[in-house]
Image: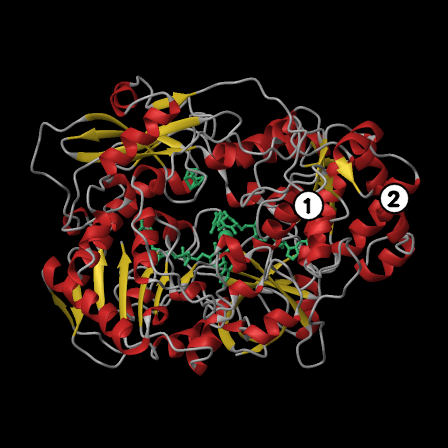
Amino acid sequence: MKRNGLSRREFLRASAAAAAAGAAGSFVLQGCARQETEIEPYRTDETLGGERFSYCGVCSANCAMIGHVAAGRLVQLRGNPDDQVGRGKLCVKGYSAIKDLYDPDRLKYPMMRTEARKGPGIDPKWVKVSWEEALQTTADGFNDAIESHGPETVAFFSRGHDWMNRLRDAIGTPNHLMHHSTCFTTHTAVWRACLGMGNRPFMLDIARAKYLLSFGWDMPSKAKNMSARDYVAALSDGAKSVVVDPRLTVTGTMADEWIPIKPGTDLAFMLAMIRIIVNEELYDAELVESTTYGLDRLRAQVQDYTPQWASGITGIDAAVITRVAREFATTRPALIPNHKRDAGGPNYSNSWRAAHCMVILNAMVGAIDHPGGQIVPRRPYLKPFNAVFPPPEFPKPRTERIDGFEKHPIVGPTRRGDFSTVTDALLTGKPYPIKAALFRKHNVLAFPDATRFVEALKKIDFIAVCDVWPSEMVQMADVVFPEPYFLETSGFGDRDYHEFYPQIALRQPMVPPLYDTRGYGGIISGIADAMGLGHIFEGVSSSTLWDEQLKAMGTSWQELNNSPNGLWSDEKPFVPTTEFKTPSGKIELYSTVFEEHGYDPLPLWQEKRELPSDQYPFYMLISRPPMHKMSQTQNNELMAQTYLENAVIMNRDRARQLGLEQGRQVYVESRAGRIRLKLQLEEGIRPDCVCIEHGFGHWSPSLSIAHQKGANEGDLIPHLSIEEMVALKDPGAGACMTDFCVSVRSA
Ligand SMILES: Nc1nc2c(c(=O)[nH]1)N[C@H]1C(S)=C(S)[C@@H](COP(=O)(O)OP(=O)(O)OC[C@H]3O[C@@H](n4cnc5c(=O)[nH]c(N)nc54)[C@H](O)[C@@H]3O)O[C@H]1N2
Ligand SMILES: Nc1nc2c(c(=O)[nH]1)N[C@H]1C(S)=C(S)[C@@H](COP(=O)(O)OP(=O)(O)OC[C@H]3O[C@@H](n4cnc5c(=O)[nH]c(N)nc54)[C@H](O)[C@@H]3O)O[C@H]1N2
Ligand code: SF4
Ligand SMILES: [Mo]
């Protein structure tokens, strides 16, 4: 077929090249600043100049970067060519991080509110305070809660951090909450149970794969640097790509085939694939025999799952399912890539079963820890904080958490946390109230049922927030601690999402801190001091930690600092993993760990939680655009120029039937809430679905660009009670982020 004079293959290559161009070259920011006069660059040392090494902190891929500084100002960022992740490139978000550094809206000094009422539309009446006052007020807030109500009434909403973890342990609270039930814990549960490893099951060797079967894996559309590059490389090298997704994404437009599946039914598609591959003995018999456990029971289990049966559920032809199963099993290396919020991510009540099928299918074709497959990251050994600075004896915290995360025996020990149950817990005060909390790197907009979460926050007597920008979470704070942006900080980081061998990237400050900020470790030790817990950080310093960690790896801070490329690498040949830390020592297709904890040891068909009805006729899809990172880049002037506000994406024919046209303001309503947005019509989305991209609807008036642009689709996501979550019997405690339906009508 010729399209614009190009064959389909040529067309795909051209799109691939266009996508690659999005992640290519470097980007100079001169001449496109918001009013230059508004910005206060660091100017104190005109001699500051030259190049500095760092790694990107916008998303967690950590692409290594080189910054060019002229006259004390960071003027350019580019990729570090020797980095195994970025290989000399950044994505649009990385290049544009420079704009975030110089964002005039940034937090500049510690602040305290003088207005008691809190919430959207209420001016906190900030006053600038000293660091001592901010730290002492926070310490008093924490100590009051501990003395009057018990240590468990202090909560930390923060990603894990060595200093914070120690203060948490010294206080003796179980309530350390993170967002992961909204992001990837369904995958985590399956990897822990079936492979005995891994909180991060998403390192992929896409470039070497010859058959890519994506069930909602969509990292190229997100401009994830290494995924976009490797996807293009695989296609250029003749790989076939099949994309199963209710919406035609960039990943799909570049693929050989798009299969618009009914949302939440991938499990049926995969079960039928397993049946075909097992019955026709298309799997890698030698590898399955030597590295997996439970094939016979799996074979017996899947016999009812015929392609015809799956067709009735998924809306996809039985012949297509059969052909894809055969192609997948007979083309090597084949891979079902996964990242986080794909069909196996915590979107639906049956997603964990789909994640289990992904492991089974990948194991059957030898895609687990083999070239062209899903790879176990080869991380460097990072000597733990507690091994460098042995902790004093701490009280044992109460087991029961406010989010009920301890009730999930497989993911509970990761202490990742559940954002979907916390609103209910805070509002009802059950199992017990939270009296004081510290929030860091988590925003209000990220919580399911976000507006109700704001109401829940009002139940907490004292809130401290560490942030870089005046986010919505900052608007709810009693005390605000400003942190430096990553481009002002130092340290080092491993390569995380793309570690074929251990590699460390140096982080040097591009410029000295622009404002009166402190790093998180410093804030935490300041709070500890003011609480009378100064002894827990006695002798503790970043420099000692880094020295010890680098020494344990076989290098030193001096060596890393003097490295000509800002990297330390320990290149080793790749040796596939053959032993797994499961009870059988093998990849457990039949999971004895699931069985032991009362979960189905093999994937069974289960309908998703909610189906379309007369009241709510549309399936809901959530995604995110390539140029924005969650809710933290909407105030970036460059990103706003390309994507200012989100919209409701609907199928063009369906909209015509409903008499709705492009650009019309509509209400989208679910059983949890209602939002108002513009309509955007596309051909490439199923007629029974709508999609909204996340990160918008900022109500903080201090974000001058992002304020009131678009809406937060999180207002539509129902929150869960702990009882409801436990009743779902999902070992990953998935938040069911899109397992609900919506109506759309003209506003
Ligand atoms: N640019 C950018 N990149 C990011 C982020 C960001 O904010 N911006 N965030 C990062 C983070 S933390 C995460 S968790 C990831 C999230 O990124 P992804 O893991 O890509 O998650 P989503 O975009 O939510 O959904 C992926 C795809 O799943 C499809 N989908 C929905 N339901 C189904 C279904 O039932 N079956 C199938 N087969 N497909 C379905 C959606 O249409 C969408 O195309 O992105 C990471 N990368
Ligand atoms: N409605 C809805 N909710 C979601 C999702 C969704 O798709 N839709 N996705 C879920 C997923 S997959 C994820 S990963 C989570 C992410 O949820 P969050 O972790 O809350 O991510 P962000 O929304 O980006 O908010 C990050 C906050 O950290 C601040 N910040 C950024 N850098 C720094 C820093 O260096 N230091 C400090 N102190 N603060 C910083 C930002 O200003 C912002 O306030 O959201 C989840 N919630
Ligand atoms: S993929 Fe983009 S945002 Fe993520 S670390 Fe790399 S350059 Fe930064
Ligand atoms: Mo995420």
Helix, strand or loop under label 1: helix
Dot 1, crowdedness within 10 Å: few (<14), some or many (≥20)? many
Residue at horizontal 43%, vertical 31%? 381
Percent coordinates x, y for residue 690 in the rendering: 62, 64
Residue at horizontal 58%, vertical 45%? 339
From the viewer's perspective, tell me whether residue 281 is left or right of residue 517: right
Relative depth, front residue between 242 and 382: 382
For mark 2, what is the residue?
296
Q: In this view, does 612 lie above or below 627?
A: below
Location of residue 76 (image quadrant): top left
- Identify the amino acid type marked 2: Asp
Residue 494 visible to the viewer: yes
Relative depth, front residue between 428 and 599: 599
For mark 1, what is the residue?
194
Relative depth, front residue between 731 and 253: 731
From the viewer's perspective, tell me whether residue 384 is left or right of residue 623: left
Residue at horizontal 37%, vertical 52%? 633
Q: In which quarter of the image is the N terminus?
A: top right
Q: Verify CB contact (< 8 Å) between mark 2 and mark 1.
A: no
Q: Residue 279 carries which label?
A: none
Among numbered discs 2 and 1, the one appearing first in the sequence: 1
Percent coordinates x, y for residue 102 in the rendering: 23, 46
